[in-house]
Image (cartoon, rainbow, N blue to C red):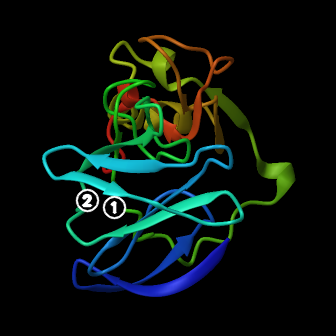
Amino acid sequence: MQENFNVIDGRDVMQHNFAFGPQLNENAVLFRLWAPLAERVLVRIEQRGEWTMRRRQDGWHVVEVKDARIGDRYKFVLGDGFAVPDPASRFQPEDVHGPSELIDPLFEWQTQGWKGRRWEEIVIYELHVGAFTEAGTFLAAMEKLDHLQRLGITAIQLMPLSDFRGRYGWGYDGVLPYAPDSSYGRPEW
């Protein structure tokens, strides 16, 4: 993983660039898919169109799309016409077989001076977002964090968040490891 300085939506920011998944910059989005056996791959962006990806010798298919924007939903279309979500998706709003959504990869941390705790001070609570509250969302869990603090909890370990098929999952059947399940909420919430 590399860290680069980039300009996104007028913000001069540092972002992490993974070797896979969409990479956003000021004027375009670079889509990448590793599909070494596919001769032809397209990226289909809902409401915008399709772009043929260039096949590289190392098995990666790449294309830079100037019309892509945060919030756009897309799939990769393989040579046989089969459309698949991005295996490196950061958000799947319509479950594991639906389109992937381009999300803002930036987060401005507010606790830059925080140094953490010594190990002997840590009391860990393992939290399952879907079962912790009746609503089963990130926002609902956040509203209950003061309760955990009053109990003496000093650290939270989130049970697996990866996107899973259907409404309920315990983390054993996660499909897209970089996309938290959409039933828990959107990335910006």
At which x and y percent is residue 171?
A: 64, 21
Labels 2 and 1 touching (C-beta < 8 A)? yes
Compare marks 2 and 1 and give the one earlier in the sequence.
2
Residue 167 point in image, percent of width and height? 41, 12
Residue 146 placed where, x, y %? Answer: 45, 38
Seen at 44% across and 36% down, the residue is 85
Q: Number of callouts in the render? A: 2
Tell me the amino acid under the disc marked 1.
Answer: Asp
Question: In the rendered image of this protein, does residue 136 appear above or below residue 150?
Answer: above
- Looking at the image, is 3 positioned above or below residue 127? below
| Nearer to us in this view, 11 or 41 | 41
Residue type, numbered disc 2: Ile
Which quadrant of the view contains residue 153?
Answer: top right
Residue 132 in the image: above or below residue 11: above
The residue carrying mark 1 is: 104
The N terminus sits in image quarter: bottom right
Indicate the secondary structure of the residue bearing disc 1. loop
Would you name the residue on which mark 2 appears? 70
Which quadrant is home to the C terminus?
top left
Q: Residue at x 62, y 59 (%)?
A: 60
* 161 lies above or below 10: above
**Residue positioned most to the left:** 47
User: For the residue carrying disc 1, how many other residues have a C-alpha within 10 Å: few (<14), some (14-19), or many (20+)?
Assistant: some
Tell me if 7 is positioned left or right of 84 in this view.
Answer: left
**Residue at left 47%, top 39%?**
78
Q: Nearer the viewer, mark 2 or mark 1?
A: 2
Q: In this orientation, does residue 59 appear?
A: yes
